[in-house]
Image (cartoon, rainbow, N blue to C red):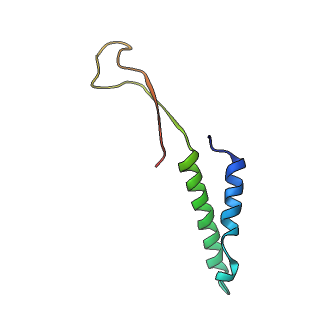
Amino acid sequence: MAMLAAVLGPALKAAVHDVNPADYPGDPAGYSDAVYQAMAGAIIFHVQTYGVVAVTVASVTGVTTGINVSGPGTGTGTIT
């Protein structure tokens, strides 16, 4: 699955709702920090889980030499 706003939006909403304001009495800055950290965690999880990277390799070394023999190549990767 590709990255989708329809997936990320509810994940952000859930992350924010999981931060309980009652855990930060008299500490609005602490609550705000917790909300932003929860949102950041949801975004990072979404990118790492659903992000897809396509890689085009212009040339490759250590292979048979010659024009168009060792490249171009394509591949995929993961985000870590």
2 to the left or right of 54:
right
Residue at x 67% of width, y 45% of height: 4
Q: Is residue 48 above or below residue 57?
A: below
Q: Is residue 67 above or below residue 22?
A: above
Residue at x 58% of width, y 45% of height: 50
**Across the whole image, how many numbered discs are drawn on residues?**
0
Q: Position of residue 62 (x, y in %)?
A: 27, 25
Residue 13 or 27: which is nearer the viewer?
13
Q: Is residue 51 above or below residue 69?
A: below
Q: Position of residue 58 (x, y in %)?
A: 42, 25
76 to the left or right of 13:
left
Residue 6 or 36: which is nearer the viewer?
6
20 to the left or right of 73:
right
Residue at x 37% of width, y 24% of height: 59
**In this view, which residue lies farthest toward the top?**
67
Quadrant location, the N terminus: top right
Q: Position of residue 13 (x, y in %)?
A: 71, 61
7 to the left or right of 57:
right
